Image (cartoon, grey):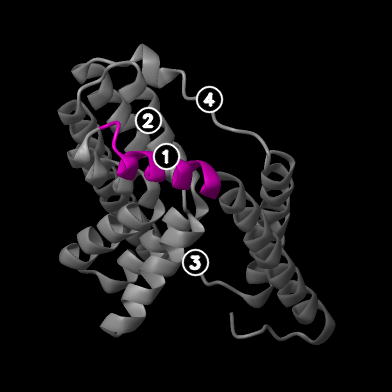
Amino acid sequence: MNLPTAISTVVGLGLLGLDPFGALIVISSIATGVRRRVVIVFFATALVSTVLTGFLLDESVQHINAWITSTFTVTPSVRATVQLLATVGLGLWTAHAWKHRNQQRKDSKATVLAGASGMVLLGIFWGVSAITDPSFYGITALSAASESIAFAVAAFTGWFLVSQAPLTLVVLTLAAGKNSSAVRRAISLAQATAKPARYTLAILLAIATVALALNTLTYVANGTFWPL
């Protein structure tokens, strides 16, 4: 994969995983009197934690893939079965995402973990929680295919910065002062992107579900798959 394609893929997956809640946690923390440098520590911890989580998952994926390749022969019927199970799983995920599209994540932890050590722990948790985002696995697959540590670090870092764009924007604008117009605009952006991001995720999951279902049905009908 050439560099422009890799960059566009990372950005696209980052947009798919766009999450404004990290910014809302930071905003809530600032409201409780957390210092700006502690917020920066939270951001840095979350970034490093995300990259390390991705790297460990990447290594696991490569080893598991090598083991499966050397141990099993994936027949068309096995592939169809796996796709059917994936269709059901994605369908359930789509239904869950659509059902909760108007709900907001509670950010009460930001008040409880307002100290420096608490914010570090929260940053670690926030980074590890990336495994709950489907787009994170897309980055993992992309990284595993490259077999490059440098590319893996760059890909996971890029994904984090894009998917956590509201958080990144808030942290960058904190230098202007927590009551500045720049920070207020960042808060507005985080709040405005929450609902569209959830709708977009649900729609993309639905599209993926339909594509897998049609691909499986194509195999059942004529014994061939789409080039997916």
Picture coordinates of residue 185, whole percent (x, y): 40, 45
- Return the disc, 2 or 3, that comes first in the chain's sequence: 2
Q: Nearer the viewer, residue 181 or 121?
A: 181
Picture coordinates of residue 202, whole percent (x, y): 66, 54
Taking the image as shown, residue 66 lies to the left or right of residue 44, namely: right
Q: Is residue 186 magenta?
A: yes
Q: Which mark is residue 106?
A: 4
Picture coordinates of residue 123, whole percent (x, y): 29, 32
Question: Which residue is identified by label 1?
Answer: 187
- Return the disc, 1 or 2, that comes first in the chain's sequence: 2
Relative to 135, does residue 216 appear above or below in the rendering? Answer: below
Of the 4 image quadrants, the one containing the N terminus is bottom left
Question: Which residue is identified by label 2?
Answer: 27
- Return the disc, 3 or 4, that comes first in the chain's sequence: 3
Find the distance from the CA under tag 3 to the CA under tag 4: 44 Å
Question: Which residue is identified by label 3?
Answer: 72
Magenta-tinted stretch: 178-193
Find the distance from the CA under tag 2 to the CA under tag 3: 50 Å
Of the 4 image quadrants, the one containing the C terminus is bottom right
Name the residue: 46% across, 37% down.
21
Contact between labelled residues 2 and 1, with CB atoms less than 8 Å apart: yes
The image quadrant that residue 91 belongs to is bottom right
Give the amino acid at mark 2: Ile
What element does badge 4 sit on? loop
